[in-house]
Amino acid sequence: MKLLETNRCFEGVWQRYSHVSALCQCEMTFSVYLPPGCESHSGAMAPGDRKPALLWLSGLTCTDQNFVQKAHAAAAASAAGCILLVPDTSPRGLNIDGEDERYDLGSGAGFYVDATESPWRDGYQMFSYITEEFLTLVAEQLPVSLEHLGVAGHSMGGHGALIMALKRPDLFRSVSAFAPICEPSKCDWGQRAFSAYLGSDQAEWAEYDACSLIRQGARGPGRIRVEQGDADDFLEAGQLRPESLQAVCEDAGIELEYQLREGYDHSYFFIQTFIAGHLGYHLVQLKHPATGDASALQTGLASR
Amino acid sequence: MKLLETNRCFEGVWQRYSHVSALCQCEMTFSVYLPPGCESHSGAMAPGDRKPALLWLSGLTCTDQNFVQKAHAAAAASAAGCILLVPDTSPRGLNIDGEDERYDLGSGAGFYVDATESPWRDGYQMFSYITEEFLTLVAEQLPVSLEHLGVAGHSMGGHGALIMALKRPDLFRSVSAFAPICEPSKCDWGQRAFSAYLGSDQAEWAEYDACSLIRQGARGPGRIRVEQGDADDFLEAGQLRPESLQAVCEDAGIELEYQLREGYDHSYFFIQTFIAGHLGYHLVQLKHPATGDASALQTGLASR
């Protein structure tokens, strides 16, 4: 992997890298935040030197940079000693017909699925790219503890976080989401993307729909936290459907901490307000021995 | 003034407005952060309901949005009950020949001076626009206490903050800057801009050069805080010249808190790391009766 940029921030460092992805068939860019004490990680790493990490999955139209610039997560990650892993949201520049025509399909809109339909299947393999290629790479090259890994995301990335945690509880020990697309099979965004990437067989869709996965028995790490603004236009428009997630979690006995926040919208202004609380939530569950008082982070900053 | 956008953030609200500026001869856009408790300010306002405010001046190429998105200032402003005022950095769309040719002249590069030279003098009146037109407007329309007003900025905006505080200590009770252009008369950026906006008479330049103003007797609010990264490329290139500011402050008996930060560069990653500390620094000096424990903000978050 190739280091593109490095910026000191809260005594740690934001770094941006690129690497050639076999699964995405292109050069992929990602960002990481390394908290103080793990910028220099060359040479052998003892398991105890590895840090807990939160994988962040971004929403439609985003690159890795939206979270880096706008989520204001570095202060809390620095204080807690947590690595942040921020991949891109799709392959780039594959020259697939129509890949740049719509904001909700193709570039910036990978939906965290492995496409089975032509022409998308060559490259649009975001589920496997992230859970296999990307995480393997960063665990090899950076002091990430794969035994202390959580996943969170926003909107399309909230959907991604939910399905990754439900399908790969061996990999992710905690999960949370901001304004996630809870039931993509039943909303316009999801139906368009799944039709294109997965074809018309809705049994295939169920493999990448959090509500369907739970109905079929998936349980993930056992708890889910969802933050949702009540002034979110996409909630009103029926794209997010948290009520479906609430219903299936109740049926399945999954503890869902659903926080409806008065006056907040779908933007990163909403995310930045509650990101420190989410980081604390993850760290409490990840139980890394070197983590400080994560519960204080969870309650103290979350309630601001 | 016309409300363009509003986003809830840390229980307060970021708002973006436009208004027609007589001095800039165009529509100007700005942003404000209103902390919790002052979003509804219609009707009569008792003086006690007005909040302390920090005016932020941005650097070259910026609009109001860079600070809003990247400085991560809302958490601290919310906690402290402080309004943030974020104007643009130049007039826009005046159709002056060459206004969009260079990043360091014209659009995005007003340098906070009142231009005297043609063609810039029609519109490039940023010193008077901000200290008179803009502040008068926001004090009329928003619960800003002009008796509790500080000024801060970054790079070109750090220069702006220094000269505004030095020239108008009646208006600004506190001043700080991140990586300011301390002596524009002696660096490439300043010489190019001042030649264009003010002509060749260096006596005119001295009116907008912090070091010259101090040499001529200006004292401002009496204290100055400057944050500077030691990995800042523009420091190395001689554009910033903090050593000149240190020398003139020492001669003049002005208390300069100069913080050189190891490993930090010129970016908003640097600003976000130390912005809470600056906010605390201002609030301690502004002494608004409703301010909480500003000294804790100053020391606690600044040292992270």
Image: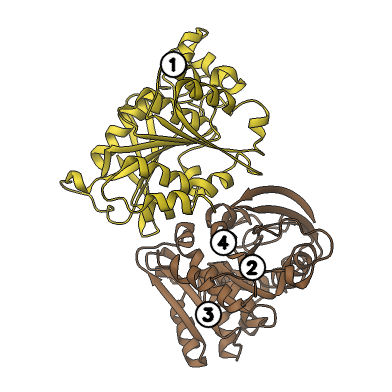
Chain colours: A yellow, B brown
Q: CA distance from mark 2 to mark 1?
A: 51 Å
Nearest to the eye among marks 4 and 2: give it: 4
Residues at discs 2 and 3 both on one chain:
yes
- Residue bearing the label numbered 4: B79
Residues at discs 4 and 2 both on one chain:
yes
Nearest to the eye among marks 2 and 1: give it: 1
Whether residue B239 can be seen here: no
Front-lying residue, B264 or A37: A37
- Residue bearing the label numbered 2: B55
Q: Earlier in the sequence, mark 4 or mark 2?
A: 2
Horizontal placement of B146 versus B274: left or right?
right
Query: Which SS class for mark 3?
Result: strand
Q: CA distance from mark 1 to mark 3?
A: 60 Å
Instruction: Output the chain of dot 1.
Output: A
Q: Could you tell me the amino acid type at mark 2?
A: Leu
Residue at image point 69% right, 83% down: B170
Q: CA distance from mark 2 to mark 3?
A: 15 Å
Residue at image point 63% right, 56% down: B63
Q: Quadrant of residue A186?
A: top right
Q: Could you tell me the amino acid type at mark 4?
A: Ala
- Residue bearing the label numbered 3: B224
Q: Position of residue A204 (x, y in %)?
A: 46, 11
In the rendered view, would you say B217 is above or below B174? Answer: below
- Residue bearing the label numbered 1: A207
